[in-house]
């Protein structure tokens, strides 16, 4: 796994050099003149990129963040939100923030390319419910440790997190048991652990940017993908997928992050404004997801056939993969997550 991570990291950084958000005299490397003690009145512009469309819960929650930041700061801080990978795919966007070319990104376990602790944001069969997820992600014992590692190794600063309903498999082939996964061409996030996991299930895992998934399913490049209900709907995947297989393999969370270097240029007052806005943002998203889950399932059932599957062999394989792939200290934190489930 370490070799895979190193190779992906190297290629990611190369790609990141090609992507930027443009110049910003009041942010990133150009924000040095502002500093923590500055009173020069320059506006702070926070540009945040994400992979979902403007109707998604991510975007709606970020609009709440924008509104709160701008109101609290009397317009001295502004937030610009770029949906649908306008600023590049997730990995490119991360690299651009690290380089100071823009300020923010929404990212999760893809950051395991920099720190193995980020893989804990999407552990198979480790969390049982959305309430357990919020408790674990908010805790100092688990969430706090992960955030420290992200700041240290990824150079990104988590300001809040979004929750996701369980990830489920969707497919154009009927999958009624683990045996039916053999050779299934499935899109997975750009994460070595996800690749290993689905290959262990017997599928053929293919990392791919979210923006490419619809067309790849449409033209048969891949047969399947896995995502929460909200992401399936946000990307209209029900239009090109026949079956939803209730694997419910991962309850995950994903961070809204600002560049750590950018964060350090802000005054304590500005950081406080962002933290307050982030609390409102994540509360909005949490409530949205909880209220929307049943409606999302009903909407998907209108066009897709739902299939229940025996999760027992999937759970057993997942345990084996995690024991083999996670570093000992990361595996120990994973066990702590399991223990914290209600």
Image: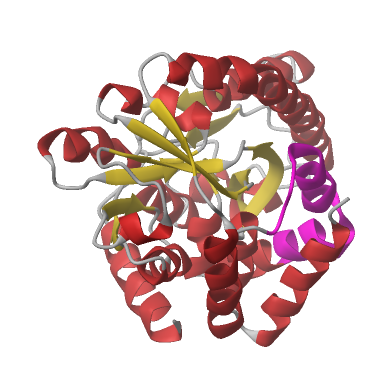
User: Measured from the top left, where is residue 96 in percent x and y?
Assistant: 41, 51
Relative to 63, 169 lies left or right: left
Residue 247 at what x, y percent from top left? 52, 47
At 44% across and 20% down in the image, what residue appears?
300
Which quarter of the picture shows residue 329? bottom right
Which residue does the image show at 61% across and 73% down from the upper left?
Answer: 319
Depth check, front residue: 22 or 65: 65
Q: Residue furthest left?
A: 219
Residue 318 x/y as whole percent: 56, 68
In reply to whether residue 130 is colored magenta, the answer given is yes
The image quarter in which residue 161 lies:
top right
* Camera-side residue of 27 and 286: 286
Magenta segment, principal secondary structure?
helix
Residue 63 occupies quadrant: top right
Instruction: Name the residue: 78% across, 63% down.
Output: 338
- Name the side, left or right, on which 141 lies relative to 211: right
Q: On screen, 192 above or below 172?
A: below
Q: Which colour scheme is used?
A: secondary structure
| Whole-percent x, y for residue 5 in the image | 42, 76
Residue 167 visible here: yes
For the magenta stretch, what is the residue range?
A: 126-148
For residue 316, above or below residue 280: below
Residue 83 visible at all? no
Task: Name the quadrant of the N terminus.
Answer: bottom left
Is residue 144 a member of the stretch shown in magenta? yes
Work out whether residue 42 or residue 258 is closer to the camera in this orientation and state it.
Answer: 258
324 is higher (above) or lower (below) than 43: below
How many labels, in total? 0
Q: Could you say which is closer to the camera, residue 80 or residue 150?
A: 150
Q: In this view, does 163 lie to the left or right of 313?
A: right
């Amino acid at each position: 796994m370490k070799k895979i991570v190193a190779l992906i990291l190297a290629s990611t950084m190369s790609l990141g050099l090609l992507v930027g958000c443009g110049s910003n005299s009041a942010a990133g490397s150009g924000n040095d003149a502002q500093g923590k003690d500055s009173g020069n009145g320059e506006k702070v512009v926070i540009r945040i990129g994400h992979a979902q469309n403007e109707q998604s819960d991510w975007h709606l929650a970020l609009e709440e963040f924008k509104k709160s930041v701008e109101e609290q700061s009397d317009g001295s801080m502004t937030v610009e939100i770029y949906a649908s990978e306008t600023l590049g795919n997730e990995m490119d966007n991360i690299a651009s923030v690290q380089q100071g070319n823009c300020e923010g990104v929404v990212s999760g376990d893809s950051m395991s390319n920099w720190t193995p602790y980020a893989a804990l944001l999407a552990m198979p069969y480790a969390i049982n419910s959305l309430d357990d997820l919020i408790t674990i992600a908010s805790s100092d014992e688990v969430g706090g440790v992960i955030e420290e590692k992200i700041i240290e190794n990824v150079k990104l600063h988590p300001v809040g997190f979004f929750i996701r309903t369980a990830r489920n498999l969707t497919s154009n082939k009927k999958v009624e048991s683990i045996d039916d996964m053999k050779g299934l061409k499935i899109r997975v996030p750009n994460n070595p652990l996800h690749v290993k996991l689905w290959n262990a299930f017997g599928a053929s895992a293919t990392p791919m940017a979210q923006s490419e998934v619809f067309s790849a399913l449409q033209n048969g490049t891949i047969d399947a993908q896995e995502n929460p209900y909200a992401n399936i709907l946000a990307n209209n995947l029900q239009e090109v997928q026949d079956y939803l297989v209730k694997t419910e393999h991962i309850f995950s969370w994903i961070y809204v992050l600002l560049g750590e270097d950018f964060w350090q240029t802000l005054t304590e007052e500005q950081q406080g404004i962002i933290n307050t806005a982030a609390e409102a943002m994540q509360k909005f998203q949490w409530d949205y997801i909880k209220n929307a889950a049943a409606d999302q399932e009903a909407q998907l059932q209108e066009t897709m056939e739902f299939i229940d599957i025996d999760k027992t062999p999937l759970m057993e394989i997942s345990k084996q993969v995690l024991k083999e792939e996670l570093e000992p200290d990361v595996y120990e934190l994973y066990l702590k997550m399991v223990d914290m489930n209600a």
